[in-house]
Amino acid sequence: MKKLFLSFIILSFSNILWAQQPVPQKPRIIISTDIGGTDPDDNQSMTHFLMYSNLFQTEGLISSPSYGDGTKKHIINMVDLYEKDLPKLQQHASGFPSAAYLRSISKQGRHGAAPYKGYASATEGSNWIVSCAKKKSAQALWILVWGGLEDVAQALHDAPEIQKNIKIYWIGGPNKKWSANSYAYIATNFPDLFFIEANTSYYGFFANNKTPDSLNNNLYSKLSIREAGFLGKDFNQYYKGQIKMGDTPSLLYMMDGNPDNPLRESWGGSFVPFKQSPRVIFTRNTNLQDTVAVCSVIEYHFKGPEINIHPDSACFTMTVSAKIGVQKWAGYYLGKGEYVIRYCPKQAESFNYSIASDIPNFPTHQGQMVVSNHWPGKPNTSDYRLGKNWYTDKPDIDLYNEQWQGAKTVQKWRNIALLDWTKRWEWLR
């Protein structure tokens, strides 16, 4: 009966099924994930990856900055579950990598954010990116970044020649807030990099509107996963089984059509080129008359006491009060009494901030800011100038899902992508 129900649902979506296009060749990928950090949606997306890992030439799984307690061990834990389910997966499709292989390519990246300059020192993860990017191959190496860009920035700093061999799909948005310094380094120094910056499109994957109950975020685990296999039982640990999976669109993008063409319709979104990434510089306290585009890089520069610490040292804090709550961000000393901090707002809102330090005679600051809901917004003279291969969320008003720009380019394929995944959960029964 359950199989009949599944067949009925698939037939109901047959017009969408035709939209999936074959990928020209099995893509080379590295996943850089903040699994184990502040947001457990990476565990859900890692489950999805492992169950589809036969579709990729996976060359690395890197524990990227989690801004929490995430480590390589969190990747290994998921691979351990996959190993138990692997015999059942192999009964239905070939090409699944062994668990031993996946463990061998799991690497530790940087812990925490990079300093103001955007990089620090090499990590096991950044060195692995360089090593994989230098392999002789007719294909580019895709790096799917689910967290911070620190290991990518470090790899580019240490081996800038690899930029011609790699392509990036980055789940930005809130990750940009944590990774502002590394993003600034890459955008400034590598404008010719092939880079998809998905700041909001991915929200379409956890949009519930126009969704049958069986594919509803709150019911999918209960009705479709049903604790199938070891991975299915583990899935319920995260958000009580509710779907978030904000990083999964990067995988879906590699599973549908030619990933070298970001303009196309695809399960992982459709994007537009953009030439200027917004960067707004303030040398004063701001107020509600000041407006910036969502996901912009905001820089506050100000003067303070000259102190004897190493330049680019974190030495003050900006406390931001916004819809998400209160968060604290590190600011840096550049030398000669110059202080600076970067901040990237992730959603349209107004927020308050204050800046303070224990440094004697440090000038305290406070202010407000308005964030508009249209990325990248109007050009500024201080913007990062980008090359021809940078892409981002489509700005069309009719492609917004609620406040999320471009989200409908993912949402329109969400149901059929989940139906396809449902078939793989059946493999684990």
Image (cartoon, helix red, strand yellow):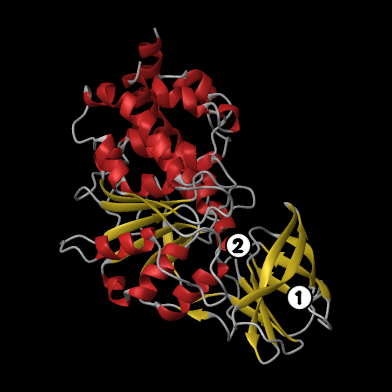
Residue visible at 37% across and 59% down in the picture: 124
Q: Which mark is residue 10?
A: none
Amino acid, disc 1: Asp
Point out the residue furthest to the bottom here: 336
Amino acid, disc 2: Lys
Residue 19 locus on image (x, y percent): 32, 41
Task: Tell me where residue 168 sits by quadrant.
Answer: bottom left
Residue 410 locus on image (x, y percent): 46, 46
Pick the residue in front: 252 or 378.
252
Residue visible at 28% across and 71% down in the picture: 162
Residue 106 locus on image (x, y percent): 35, 48
Residue beneath disc 1: 290
- Label 1 crowd bin: few (<14), some (14–19), many (20+), radius 10 Å: few
Q: Is residue 420 visible?
A: no
Image quadrant holding the C terminus, namely top left
Residue 322, above or below 157: above
- Label 2 crowd bin: few (<14), some (14–19), many (20+), radius 10 Å: many
Under circle 1, the secondary element is: loop
Pick the residue in front: 171 or 121.
121
Residue beneath disc 2: 177
Image quadrant holding the N terminus, namely top left
Residue visible at 34% across and 24% down in the picture: 423
Point out the residue furthest to the top here: 1
Under circle 2, the secondary element is: helix
Tag nearer the camera, 1 or 2 = 2
Please tell me which of labels 1 and 2 falls first in the chain.
Answer: 2
